[in-house]
Amino acid sequence: MSRNFAVGWGETWQYDAYDPAKRTISQIEGSAILRTRHSLVKRGAFETRVLPYNTLSISPKRFAYISGCPMATFDLATIQDAIREERLDGWLLYDFRGLNVLAKRVVGIPNEKMLSRRWFYWIPATGDPKKLVHRIEPGALDHLPGTKAIYLRWQELEAGVKAMLEGSKTIAMEYVPRNANPYISRVDAGTIELVKSFGAGPVSSGDLVQRFEACWDDEQWAMHLEAAKHTDSAFTAAFGFITERIRSQRTVREVEVQRVILDHFAKHGVGSDHAPNCSVGPHSGDPHYEPLEGSDAEIREGDFVLIDLWAKCKKPRAVYSDLTRVAFVGKTVPTKYQEIFTIVARARDAAIARVQHAFSSGEKMQGWHVDDAARNVIESAGYGKEFCHRTGHSIGQEVHGNGANMDNLETREERRVLPRTCFSVEPGIYFPEWGVRSEVNVYVDATGHVHVTGGELQREVFALLKT
């Protein structure tokens, strides 16, 4: 049975008490007792195999631990299939001191593992991969398949890269010409110059990275839906708290609403990397306003309020739900607020419709197409300058993930919108006195069906004191 367990990072780990609910393990000395349940999970370039449910006594083995899932093996065949589909000669992954977090994730080096010397990993479209590592860290890539070369002097490093790439012309790297997409362009210009000097032509690995970093498996999709139930209900808790305080003539401040949301998350087993936003009046006109104790504002009757919140399940590999809604603290919403909200909602719906059309018609859609669909609505209404950010961002294990963004403003996002990826759609219009944003999440499943998550779409500004 132990042959099913994979090698890890060159360390010898033994575990006791694998918790199938939490998907966690504990490190101990000696042999291991592993309690498992039947599961097969795809996580990017790694395939996680968990044996049928029982208790196993296992001799000390070396294990991989990828994003909370033990026993992962590098899936070379899947990566090479993707390289061939992209019509590339290969993919050159490179990092120095964690500057290329995307490369680290693709090859399965944990965030907490810091390597101090440059490494290269060449995955050709066919054939065996090649590793190039420093003599001080010769085992840096030992968990990966392929032959290994070790360098000491800089001349040996350059010669090693040249040998790796011999005969290759078009190679993927974490690079975008003119740094047009800094989310992907992680390799420094000098390294690109070195690669070009050997006759190779680097192209962006953006769509490859998406396949092995941004695509969700079924378990992650289920965790997103679970999180979305609680982000959706958090608005009821937050707006209800404001309503109760105002009706009882008690004060209510932005940070108090923030705490209500965080308490709601904790009660339902979800959490986030940082606190949500409750923005009143002029603060709602600042897309990245953050309420802080001592500098936040009081919410009064007659105020416009925007709440932006995000959370994920407290489980390994969980992914986020990220939503924004707006409300007016009064019985009747003034026309100016509803008119602007209606424009924003039409832009939101146009972006969603653009995605639905693309996948129903078989069109290969890029992120900038979605941004244009929303932005055209707002620009046609005369508020283009007031829409000061992209239409949406990738969503993953971080609230801002590493897949395609819906952007043709800050960058021209030419990465494709792929099946099994999720992103926000959140157009907005902002004035100095107040601002409107409506945010939903869109997930494209493996069949190309487009899901909008997070409850019912907001169709009008909520009137919190309406009887």
Image (tube, helix red, strand yellow):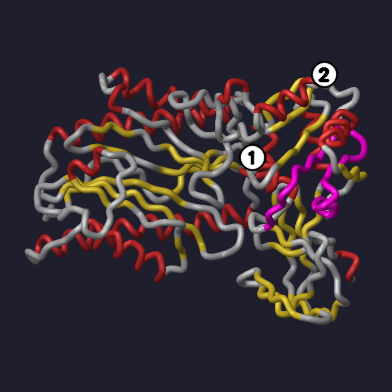
Q: What residue is disc 1 on?
A: 447
Does 183 sit left or right of 328 as displayed? right
Q: Percent from the top left, x then y, of residue 48? A: 76, 58
What is the span of residues highlighted in magenta in the rendered image?
113-142
- Circle count: 2
| Sequence-wise first label, 2 or 1 | 2
Q: Which callout, 2 or 1, points to the residue nearer the camera?
A: 2
Around disc 2, counting alpha carbons within 10 Å, would you say few (fewer than 14), some (14 to 19), or many (20 or more)? some
Task: Characterize the magenta stretch by its predominant secondary structure.
Answer: loop
Quadrant (top left/top right/bottom left/bottom right) for the N terminus? bottom right
- Gap in angstroms between the C-alphas marked 2 and 1: 40 Å
Between 379 and 198, the one nearer to me in the picture: 198
Say which residue appears at 32% left-offset and 24% top-offset: 378
For the residue pair 68 and 453, the one nearer the viewer reads as: 68
Tell me whether the residue at label 2 lies in contact with that at label 1, contact meaning CB atoms closer than 8 angstroms.
Answer: no
Quadrant of image for the C terminus = bottom left
Look at the picture and state if 382 lies above or below 232. above
Who's the residue at 43% across and 37% down the image? 425
Rendered location of residue 191, percent (x, y): 72, 30
Q: Which residue is mark 2?
A: 199
Badge 2 element: loop
Residue at the image point whose x is 25% and y is 48% from the top:
279
Q: Amino acid at mark 1?
A: Thr
- Amino acid type for the residue under numbered disc 2: Gly
444 with respect to 61 (left or right): left
Magenta stretch holds residue 134: yes
Horizontally, is 162 left or right of 455 in the view? right
Asked whether 442 falls inside the magenta stretch, the response is no
Could you say where residue 263 lies in the image, as x and y percent from the top left?
35, 68
Q: Quadrant of residue 241?
A: bottom left
